[in-house]
Image: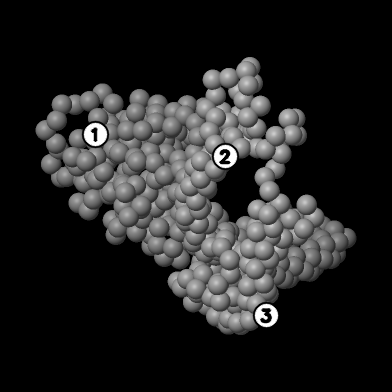
Amino acid sequence: MAVEAALAGLRAEINCPICLDDLRDPVTIECGHNFCRSCIQQSWADLQDRFPCPVCRHPCQERHLRSNTQLGRMIDITKLLQITRSKKKRQEGSRLCKKHSQVLTLFCEEDQEVLCPLCTEPPNHQGHQVRPMKEAASHHRQRLNSYIEPLKKQVADVQKLVATQDRKLLELREKVENRRSKLASEFEHLTQSVEHEQEEVLSKLAEEEKDIQQKLIANTTAFSDHISNLKALLKEVAEKSVMSDVKLLIDIKRLLHRCETLRPPAVYWVQLRREECSLPPQYSALQKIIQKFREEVTLDPKTAHPNLLVSEDKKSVTFMRKKQRVRRNPKGFSVDPVVLGSEGFACGRHYWEVQVGDKPEWAVGVCKDSLTKERKQSPPRQNRCWTIQLQNGDYVAQGSIPVALVLKEKPRGIGIYLDYELGQVSFYSLNDMSHIHSFMDTFSEVLKPYFCVGCDPKPLTVSAVRDYAG
């Protein structure tokens, strides 16, 4: 049995890992594994830069195949040993049944057992298909041979899949490297943008400090002059008070007037402006907001002012000098050229965009749904609208308290982001996706998109989601 095991182990060592047959024209590759020359050449046929070993996956740098003549001779010797061993087994004669000491000449197909004639006597194997061993061996040899080619094909298919996976690994490395380079470039741009913004903000802060310093110095000088005036007046009053009656009363009116009207200069209170930073969208995560929370906002013609013409797709609105011949709607605005969005928001986060182009007047944002009940009021009552507007050439954030805005560039489009639970409405310029202004408040009722068109004939358009996706 030890010889059989050793011979079986030797047989396994001389098999090609690819075709699982005896090695033919054996070659050794860089990692030390052996293959048939034709098998390894076929395995590497579609590869170029790197050639992985089918056994250990070691990436060989080149198609270097070293003939192994010594291994070839060992294979020939092993085959001779196999043939000699087979002859010796045949010479040793047939195996005997352990139970009956009879020659094993039969095979039971149901139990898959080798039998002697006595093993087939009832009740053992009764009704089973029992046939001569030679016939059964021939049948099962054919069955085993029928598995060889499919198994070889499976091995080849799996090896192709492994080769494909290796290519995928190389592709992954290339993609990661490209992404790494791109991210490095973006972060470098982001760093430059932040540094530029920092320099600009600090420069403004330094200018403001210089201006305040000058005002404080001027204020201090004014107080010094006032103290000098007070001392002079004090001296004059003291001298006047000890004069004779006639001298005391001469010019008393002027002196009393000076005493009563002399006032100290106003104290200059130092108050620094809050410098806002307009960082790029990579920092503010605006792109993620757009992708995740973008809404398909449409205009509600029922709320439109009579002079407003809403397009058929409810995406664009234009001011017309002549009022539209439409049935008057109780929800419509009658004073300002305003139209609301059809959608109402009572929770969640939402983003939409409005193209204002070069219109000279406009206002966009959100308002409470109840604003339609006060449509005759102009301007709308405080705490009902959160908008930014362009009017008379000035940009204003119109909330509970108007805030004047100073923009570097005239925005041709506005991005609006509403976070209902957070109580935030933010506005972005679509020119460069920079932040314009944010409102913080508490919302308790339905909010609707708000659009004030102005009285010029240029349209105001709500961007469609498909425009952005394309």
C-alpha distance separating marks 1 and 3: 91 Å
Q: Quadrant of residue 316?
A: top left
Apparent side of residue 52 relative to residue 454 in the rendered image (left or right): right
Report how many numbered discs are placed on residues in the image: 3
Contact between marks 1 and 3 (CB within 8 A): the answer is no
Q: With respect to residue 437, does 27 lie above or below?
A: below
Q: Is residue 176 visible?
A: no
343 left or right of 44? left
As drawn, is 126 to the left or to the right of 344? right
User: x, y (%) of residue 33?
Assistant: 65, 71
Q: Earlier in the sequence, mark 2 or mark 3?
A: 3
> Which residue does the image show at 70% across and 34% down from the upper left?
102
In the image shown, does 46 or 250 lie closer to the viewer? 46
Q: CA distance from mark 2 to mark 1?
A: 93 Å
Amino acid marked by disc 3: Gln
Contact flag, marks 2 and 1 (Cβ < 8 Å): no
The colour scheme used here is one colour
Choose the circle earlier in sequence order: 1 or 3: 3
Residue beneath label 1, please? 301
Q: Is residue 15 above or below residue 448?
A: below
Report how far apart the C-alphas of labels 2 and 3 lie in the structure.
40 Å
| Residue indicated by mark 3 | 70
Question: Residue 105's spot in the image, x, y percent?
Answer: 61, 37
Residue 358 seen in the figure? yes
